[in-house]
Image: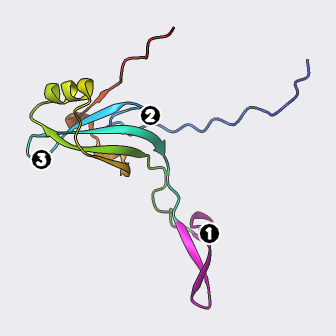
Amino acid sequence: MATTGTPPAKSIGVNFPAESVSCAPGDYILRREAGGRWKIFLVKDIVQLNRLVPLKRDGVVTGLLEEAPLLDSVAPAYMGQIHLLVTAFGAEHSSSEEGLRAIASGALGQAVENVCLDVQRFPKASSLVQTPPAAPTR
């Protein structure tokens, strides 16, 4: 039987680094900082970055070009790296349990939106992922 319409998109397999947490948009990540305090991040999106190179004419930027096609034998910056677009919350917590209670109550402190961090900044050894409960259906 013939099919019509748009063909399915090719699947591009990308995996989280083995030493980093795995997460999805909407998840909270609690990370133990050097002083033993815990910080909370809300995952907004998961991205890969491409460096852009400014094109100039007479010293004025007239456009941007992706760096990768311009390189000969050097790997482009950030190649294959996964980054998280997060909201970083200002409150610090004395334990992960206290952090989980803060998530549940919404007492997260001042929010800094749209912070882009390499997922490797969230190692499994010092981070945990909290997936919020699904909203009730009606």
Name which residue type carries label 2. Pro
- Disc 1 from disc 2: Cα separation: 29 Å
Q: Which of marks 1 and 2 is in front?
A: 2
Give the labeled residue for mark 1.
Answer: 65
**Secondary element type, mark 3:** loop
Residue at position x 55%, y 72% from top?
A: 53
Extreme residue toward the top, this view:
138
Residue at position x 41%, y 46% from top?
A: 85
Name which residue type carries label 3. Ala
Give the labeled residue for mark 3.
Answer: 34
The quadrant where residue 120 appears:
top left
- Magenta-colored stretch includes residue 87: no
The quadrant where residue 73 appears:
bottom right
- Disc 1 from disc 3: Cα separation: 39 Å
User: Residue 25 shows which numbered tag?
Assistant: 2
Say whether disc 1 or disc 3 marks the residue closer to the N-terminus. 3
Q: Nearer the viewer, mark 2 or mark 3?
A: 2
**Does 18 sit left or right of 98 as displayed?**
right
